[in-house]
Image (cartoon, rainbow, N blue to C red):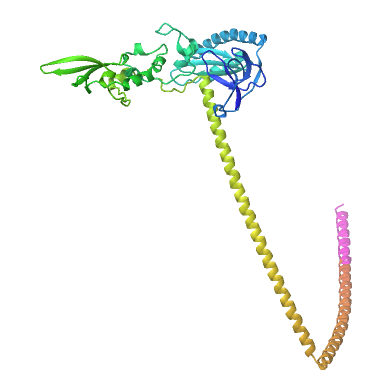
């Protein structure tokens, strides 16, 4: 069970659930809450109570506080500012030449956002308009396109019945209304008589639809053959749905007689509901009266749709996250198993190789022991003599090598001295040539003088 409180933000608007916390709230009390649009002040319509968990769509936001007199003054100031903003926005629309009809302007409670509601036949490019409005009001601007039924709900009015419009007085949701409802209720298919102020089919056609469906299910169709209480078979000429009367044509020999019976007298069995068919002329004449769920919806409907979409996205994201976690866990488990298997295989190979090495070492040791035992004393003496001769040869070779190194060293020294003497003689001759050239140059200069 969840504790909730029902709050409405505008006349005939939807009721939203919030968490009342520990506040003592009563019907018609004003409270401050946080919504998708920002901080708003609403009216309590459903006092705090407990409901089932399935009736709560998403997480409930808590009530911030109970509204004070200062909050009421802020609301009245916002109303005055909304009138000025409406006039300014209307001038800007004319200036930009946009084909749109401004319906209403609304400030949020904290003045953090200014909303403009408008109607138009198609899509409107209002980016330049938003820039102009933002430069004037210095706050967040939002333009929201709505339908003609939402426009009528905001503006209000009087219906053909002489009473206030249902949508602006108490109707919180727009129910789908079709032309088949009007035909099943035997109404005139004149567009001026079955359409409301908004130009769409009247919402009140839905009110009596269930009753007409039940009453029509008890009546025969026109042209159907029925048995009268007198035991005569007649043909249905006409029916009266509300009075539950049937007019039957009875053939009395040379003449035909029209008699009227009640449904109970004819003792008819309830028939299944028949689909009402419309002709092509009727469809063409009444085209445009049905509201085919246009994309322009009110703020309440949009918020409700966004909540449902957000809930679906959250559910999908949770499922995807759980699936990813399961996949990751399976991959980790498989990887651990592969690693363990590789380690076991490596360990078995190492153990096998170690055992093979031990066997080879044991076999080699056994063969060495056998060879050592089989070797005779003569073999040891022969090996000793051979080793001594090798040592003598090595010593002689070392002596020869030493002599060769000394001889090479002396030869290198001799070559070095020869190179030095040659270079010295060459330098001496060069110096002589240089002195001769200097003397020659000097004598040549003297001759010139």
Q: Residue pushed farthest left? A: 254
The residue at the far bottom in this view is: 378
List x then y, in percent, for residue 350. 70, 67
The residue lying toward the viewer, choosing from 311 and 424, is 311
Give the image location of residue 433, x and y in percent: 86, 63
Q: In terms of secondary structure, what is the magenta stretch mainly?
A: helix
Left-right relation of 14 to 209: right
Q: Magenta span has 232?
A: no
Q: Give above or below for 429 relative to 298.
A: below
Q: Is residue 188 above or below residue 427?
A: above
Residue 305 seen anywhere in this rendered image of the structure? yes
Viewer-closest of 212 and 255: 255
The N terminus: image quadrant: top right
* Res. 341 image quadrant: bottom right
Q: Does 75 appear above or below 316? A: above
Where does residue 270 sit, x and y in percent of width and height? 31, 24
**Whole-percent x and y of residue 272?**
32, 27
Query: Quick check: is 442 in the magenta stretch?
Result: yes
> From the viewer's perspective, is residue 371 above or below residue 176?
below
Q: State which region is magenta.
A: 427-449
The part of the image, by quadrant, that contains residue 174 is top left
Visible residue check, residue 179: no
Nearer the observer, 115 or 347: 347
Q: Residue furthest front?
A: 230
Identify which residue is drawn at 88% across, 81% down. Answer: 403
Q: Nearer the viewer, residue 127 or 276?
A: 276
Does residue 38 appear to the left or right of 225 in the view shown? Answer: right
Quarter of the view holding residue 231: top left
């Amino acid at each position: 069970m969840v504790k909730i409180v029902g709050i409405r933000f505008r006349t005939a608007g939807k009721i939203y659930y919030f968490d009342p916390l520990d506040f003592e709230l009563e019907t018609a009390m004003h409270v401050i809450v946080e919504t998708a649009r920002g901080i708003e002040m609403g009216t309590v319509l459903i006092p705090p109570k407990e409901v089932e968990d399935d009736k709560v769509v998403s997480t409930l936001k808590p009530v911030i506080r109970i509204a004070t007199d200062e909050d009421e003054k802020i609301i009245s100031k916002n109303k005055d500012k909304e009138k000025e903003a409406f006039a300014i926005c209307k001038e800007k629309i004319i200036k930009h030449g946009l084909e749109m009809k401004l319906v209403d302007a609304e400030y949020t409670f904290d003045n953090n956002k200014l909303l403009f509601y408008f109607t138009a036949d198609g899509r409107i490019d209002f980016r330049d308009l938003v820039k102009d409005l933002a430069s004037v009001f210095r706050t967040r601007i939002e333009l929201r396109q709505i339908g003609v039924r939402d426009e009528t709900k905001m503006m209000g009015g009087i219906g053909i019945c002489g009473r206030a419009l249902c949508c602006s007085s108490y109707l919180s949701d727009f129910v789908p209304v079709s032309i088949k409802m009007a035909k099943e209720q035997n109404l005139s298919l004149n567009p001026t008589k079955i359409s409301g102020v908004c130009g769409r089919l009247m919402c009140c056609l839905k009110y009596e639809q269930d009753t007409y469906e039940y009453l029509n299910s008890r009546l025969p169709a026109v042209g159907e053959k029925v048995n009268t209480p007198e035991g005569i078979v007649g043909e249905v000429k006409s029916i009266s749905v509300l009075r539950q009367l049937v007019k039957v044509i009875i053939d009395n020999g040379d003449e035909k007689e029209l008699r009227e019976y009640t449904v109970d007298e004819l003792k008819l069995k309830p028939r299944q509901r028949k689909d009402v068919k419309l002709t092509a002329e009727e469809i063409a004449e009444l085209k445009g009266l049905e509201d085919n769920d246009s994309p322009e919806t009110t703020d309440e409907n949009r918020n409700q749709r966004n909540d449902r979409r957000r809930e679906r996205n959250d559910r999908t994201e949770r499922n995807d996250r759980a699936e990813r976690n399961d996949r990751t866990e399976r991959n980790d488990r498989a990887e651990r198993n592969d690693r363990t298997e590789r380690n076991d295989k490596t360990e078995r190979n190492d153990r096998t190789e170690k055992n093979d090495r031990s066997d080879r070492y044991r076999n080699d040791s056994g063969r060495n022991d056998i060879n050592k035992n089989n070797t005779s004393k003569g073999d040891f003496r022969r090996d000793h003599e051979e080793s001594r001769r090798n040592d003598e040869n090595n010593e002689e070779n070392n002596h020869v090598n030493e002599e060769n190194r000394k001889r090479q060293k002396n030869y290198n020294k001799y070559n070095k001295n020869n190179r030095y003497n040659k270079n010295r003689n060459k330098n001496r001759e060069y110096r002589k040539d240089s002195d001769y050239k200097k003397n020659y140059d000097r004598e040549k200069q003297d001759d010139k003088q």
